[in-house]
Amino acid sequence: MSAWVLPDHIADVLPSEARHIEELRRDLLDTARCYGYELVIPPLLEHLASLLSGAGSALDLQTFKLVDQLSGRMMGLRADSTPQVARIDAHLLNRAGVARLCYCGPVLHTRPGAPHATREPLQLGAEIYGHAGLEADIEVLNLALDCLKAAKVAQPSVDLADAQLVKAILSDVTLVPTQLAGIYASLAAKDSPELANLTRDLPEQQRQGLLTLVQLYGDASVLAEAQKYLPPLTGVREALQNLQQLADHLTAVNVTVDLADMQGYAYYTGARFSIYAPSASAALVRGGRYDRVGAVFGRRRPAAGFSLDLKTLVAAVEPRPLQAAIRAPWRDEPALACEIAALRAAGAVVFCVLPGHESEVDEFHCDRELVQVDGQWRVQAI
């Protein structure tokens, strides 16, 4: 095998795509900053005990592990930035009130999340700590939609679910872990026969509640149906009320609901959302409420947020036009050098053409050129 062949699901990012990704990164971080979110940059590498504290087995399996040559301790390359941001909030900032934090950086996965996915996503996210009310959920959802708007994603739609529903239905029932895992798997697959088999010994109210969840997916009217047919338990009512408020807030986009969607049930603690678009085959954004994320760091703060992969996002939007630039000749001439420096200081891109390369194509669109007129260097349209 050639030494320059990269590992499976790892790829170089070439100039056109890299430019687009970088422009999106700046636009999305600027959007988060307009909401008051502060940028943090967690390290790519951490001690494994810290990196995986409180993480589920899925994140453990996705994490590359290695031995630190300095300390001999096990280290990991992050597979998700959220636990690191929770650590920053809990230990480094330690604020009593609300903290709004955003981030953008690569994460590494031992296996791709989908057949053609990269193992090196460029994860961008935003998280709000310290507020338990639905206002925080609405804020991160608004920010996620505004980020997609900044990226010019057409016709986004929001799918809502709640990780608390099953927990609320089973609040008075004791199950062994394997049975509970089977119930969640059956719900995710909408496998009613298997779910009926797994719940055959449960109290009738709880059993029927779980079997009903499988049927509760579709548009926002599903929430009204859920109010009628799910058990009238306090946790169930609260979850449905929160989802209804979120759905009522989303007047500008299409809203769907899937109450059997238990993705991330071990991580999320309340309402969760996925944002889709016709130009992408999978969700572009995932987020929701995860109040337990900081518990292992000594601060069980309310938390809500979202994340997305910029590499996936850039493939779902139209390519941006090349940046307009000024073409200039290459000469060792002080007057020309001064003019080029002044143009660059003003924010213009000035592309100096090396001798013999005048006809080559590059990443910039030169719509003007620097020419000498009556002894003076001037910018003219091409």
Image (cartoon, rainbow, N blue to C red):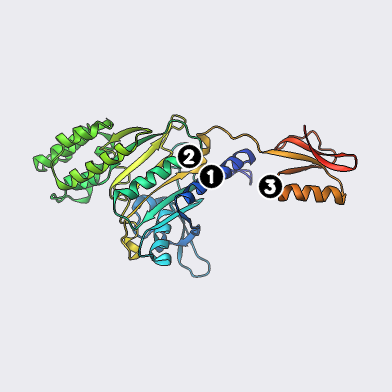
Q: Horizontal and vertical percent for residue 297?
A: 35, 64
Helix, strand or loop for disc 2: loop
Task: Give the mark nearest the N terminus, 3 or 1.
Answer: 1
Q: Horizontal and vertical percent for residue 177?
A: 22, 50
Please tell me how crowded label 2 is: few (under 14), some (14-19), or many (20+) other residues with Cα within 10 Å.
Answer: some
Q: Horizontal and vertical percent for residue 62?
A: 42, 50
Separation of disc 3 and disc 1 at Cα? 17 Å
**Residue at 74% over, 44% down:** 350
**Residue at 82% over, 40% down:** 378
Separation of disc 3 and disc 2 at Cα? 36 Å
Q: Which mark is residue 87?
A: none
Label 1 is placed on what type of residue? Answer: Asp
Would you identify the image quadrant in which residue 138 lies? top left
Q: Left of 79 or right of it: where is 179?
A: left
Residue 270 appears in view: yes
**Residue at 74% over, 47% down:** 343
Tags 2 and 1 in contact by the CB under 8 Å rule? no
Label tally: 3
Q: Which mark is residue 117?
A: 2
Please tell me how crowded label 3 is: few (under 14), some (14-19), or many (20+) other residues with Cα within 10 Å.
Answer: few
- The quarter in which the N terminus is drawn is top right
Residue 120 appears in view: no
**Residue at 65% over, 36% down:** 322
Please tell me how crowded label 1 is: few (under 14), some (14-19), or many (20+) other residues with Cα within 10 Å.
Answer: some
Label 2 is placed on what type of residue? Answer: Ala
Label 3 is placed on what type of residue? Answer: Gly
Is residue 13 placed above or below 251 in the rendered structure?
A: below
Residue situated in front as seen by the camera: 137 or 269 = 137
Is residue 229 placed above or below 34 in the rendered structure?
A: above
| Residue pointed to by mark 3 | 347
Residue situated in front as seen by the camera: 183 or 82 = 82
| Residue pointed to by mark 1 | 27
